[in-house]
């Protein structure tokens, strides 16, 4: 995948992984649009990286997704890369009943938005000579963590959706990548609470380096740091063969 001269939309691009990717893509000579839910965060992102184009949007909401698609179609019709990065992670105690899920929008943000954004942008990307959809899943989509049951399930869903999307688009110019991070310790998945560094975590800088290398080499499953071991452990050539047979 070429990494210069692209026009790239990154959801959840005002902070964390999204902003780190946006900053690197700008440095590589790309036009980058970021979207996010908070005007103040978007403003801070533009102060840090003035070349960014910012658009306020909550991708969990259908009307706002459609508004974003219209904005990009009108102002950046040359778009050829979409990065579905927006996500949140919440601790959920399922023993406390359905009240524990009240206001929990992990499914809408982490999974539903990824699916609908991909589908909305396929027509715009399909006409380009080279294009890509990058979905940010998680190592917890491979090995779920019980304190994050909804998050883990949504990221497993993102991984499954990405694989089938790649299969459906195999005869188009659109390449489909799965970015599989472990814990990224300098991000704020927990609504403003910075993640803590652990032996199984990486920094955004390490993550972005790995993503850039993976894109250049057309590695469609880009597992980073400890997530590489988890992906290798979960890999099963027999199941891969069954997938190919089922989808001929």
Image (cartoon, grey):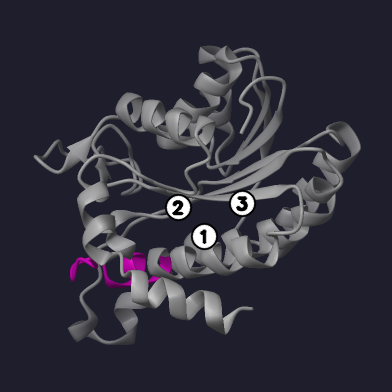
Foreground residue among 141 and 13? 141
Cα distance between the residues tagged 1 and 3: 8 Å
- Where residue 72 sits, quadrant-wise, is top right
The residue identified by callout 2 is 87
Whole-number angstrom distance, CA of label 1 to CA of label 2: 6 Å
Nearer to us of marks 3 and 2 is 2
Segment colored magenta: 143-154
- Reply yes or no: does residue 25 show up in magenta: no
The answer, for residue 51, to whether it is visible in the render is yes
Q: How crowded is mark 2: few (under 14 residues within 10 Å), some or many (20 or more)?
A: many
Residue 96 in percent (x, y) is at: 21, 83
Of the 4 image quadrants, the one containing the C terminus is bottom right
Labels 1 and 3: the sequence-earlier one: 3
**CB within 8 Å, label 1 to label 2:** yes
Give the image location of residue 69, x and y in percent.
79, 49
Q: Position of residue 131 (x, y in %)?
A: 72, 41
Return the disc, 1 or 2, that comes first in the chain's sequence.
2
């Amino acid at each position: 995948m070429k990494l210069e001269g692209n026009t790239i939309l990154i959801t959840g691009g005002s902070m964390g992984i999204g902003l780190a990717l946006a900053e690197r893509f700008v440095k590589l000579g790309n036009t980058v649009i970021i979207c996010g839910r908070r005007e103040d965060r978007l403003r801070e992102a533009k102060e840090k990286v003035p070349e960014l184009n910012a658009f306020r949007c909550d991708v969990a909401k259908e009307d706002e997704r459609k508004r974003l698609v219209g904005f990009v179609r009108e102002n950046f019709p040359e778009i050829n890369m979409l990065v579905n990065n927006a996500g949140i992670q919440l601790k959920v105690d399922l023993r406390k009943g359905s009240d524990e899920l009240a206001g929990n929008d992990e499914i809408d943000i982490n999974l539903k938005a990824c699916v609908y954004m991909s589908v909305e942008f396929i027509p715009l990307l399909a006409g380009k000579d080279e294009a890509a959809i990058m979905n940010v899943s998680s190592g917890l989509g491979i090995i779920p963590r019980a304190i994050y049951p909804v998050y883990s399930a949504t990221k497993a869903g993102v991984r499954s959706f990405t694989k089938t999307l790649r299969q459906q688009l195999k005869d188009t110019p659109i390449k489909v990548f799965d970015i599989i991070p472990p814990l990224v310790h300098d991000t704020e998945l927990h609504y403003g609470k910075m993640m803590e560094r652990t032996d199984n975590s990486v920094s955004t800088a390490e993550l972005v380096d790995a993503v850039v290398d993976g894109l250049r080499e057309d590695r469609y499953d880009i597992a980073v740091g400890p997530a590489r071991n988890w992906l290798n452990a979960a890999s099963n050539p027999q199941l891969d063969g069954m997938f190919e047979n089922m989808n001929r």
